Amino acid sequence: MRPKLWKPAGLTILWATIVLAVLYIAYRLVDPFPPRHFTIAAGIAGTGYDDYARQYARVLARHGVALEVRNYASAVEHFDVLRNAASGVQAALMNFGFTHPRDADILSSLGGVSDSAIFLFSRTAEPMTQFAQFRGRRLAIGKTKTALRTLMTEALRAADALDASTHFADLDYKESIEALIAGDVDVAAYAGPLHDGIIQSALAAPEIRLMNVSQAQAVAKTVPGMKHVVLWRGLMSLPRDIPNADIDLLAMRNRVLVRKELHPALQYLLLEAMREVHGAPGPFHRLGEFPAEQPNDLPLSPTAEAFYRSGPSFWQRYTSFWLTSLLNRIVFFVIPIAAMLIPVIGFAPSFYRWLHTRRI
């Protein structure tokens, strides 16, 4: 009796082992489990990009994912490392306006995250309202290859405000304002938080004016990486009525880009971090305006499209990140394969009876 009972049991175990092996190999090779570490490129340490990236890292750490933040000095460097697969950088905080046609083959967007207002200060006898007045001036509009310098140069070129007499000072934000106060430059640009100390020092300095860009809407329509925003009267200081009138400004549009091979589960987790960090209202945007599915020079990733249009799934709302990832893999991958293998499993007893009959 023992050999008779052992043969069907052994055959069943053999078939079960084969099925499990097939499932495991397909599970590992076709849909790998999301890694627990990836890297994002941010701006210079201490800037807004760096602060955003480190806030993302704190959110992801709650889900057991380590986000490494790497700082780079310019927007061009951000794109260079993101394009290079060997760099190890899978995501980056970026401005608009630096892509090439071939970037769409390797990069996707997760959407916009903020607008960085550009404050233009001048120390001229007459108020400056148009970029055409910049001709022949000494300009400090960011260092070479930075997003601010690149976008401002495009705006000045569109307004025909550049000529041979225009001089550019290669200074960072703080150095630009200091040079303006000292009289070494005529115009200085700063892109940062509204209540930053650098802006306050510029406003407090005598003979320094905040430029009202009268053609801001037209410039924003011409330069894709820019947006028109309004600094409302009294927003900087309501008791002192600063500014004492509405001021039109330009802003840089910020977004998060990822390499297409970044695991969809990590893309979704990064989108959740973006919503937590950027969802609050600000001086130039409404509650819940960011992250945003906005016009872009790179297509949204499929994960981002689902995030903006369908929202989180049932499991994503009520389970942890890793359990959600496991359940998604079971539903969309393991169950269909198991269903396909059911006929094979059901064939095993019939095959055994055929062998037994043939033996008799």
Image: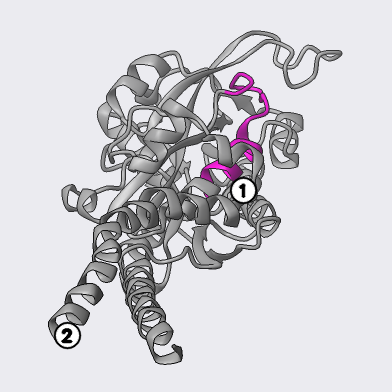
Q: Residue at x 42, y 48 (%)?
A: 331
**Residue 135 inside the magenta-drawn segment:** no
- Crowding at dot 1, Cα within 10 Å, few <14 / some 14-19 / many 20+, comes out as some
Q: Earlier in the sequence, mark 1 or mark 2?
A: 1
Q: Which residues are magenta?
A: 270-288
How far from the left and from the top, in percent, is residue 77? 39, 62
The one nearer the camera, 72 or 264, is 264
Q: Residue farthest to the right? A: 239
Indicate the amino acid at tag 1: Tyr
How far from the left and from the top, in percent, is residue 289? 55, 23
Secondary structure at numbered mark 2: loop
Indicate the amino acid at tag 2: Ile
230 horizontally vs 242: left or right: left
How far from the left and from the top, in percent, is residue 29? 32, 71
Image quarter where the N terminus lies is: bottom left
Q: Residue at x 22, y 48 (%)?
A: 104
The one nearer the camera, 7 or 266, is 7
Q: Which residue is mark 1?
A: 52
- Crowding at dot 2, Cα within 10 Å, few <14 / some 14-19 / many 20+, comes out as few
Q: Residue at x 74, y 33 (%)?
A: 195
12 horizontally vs 68: left or right: left
Label annotation for residue 360: 2
How far from the left and from the top, in percent, is residue 341? 28, 61
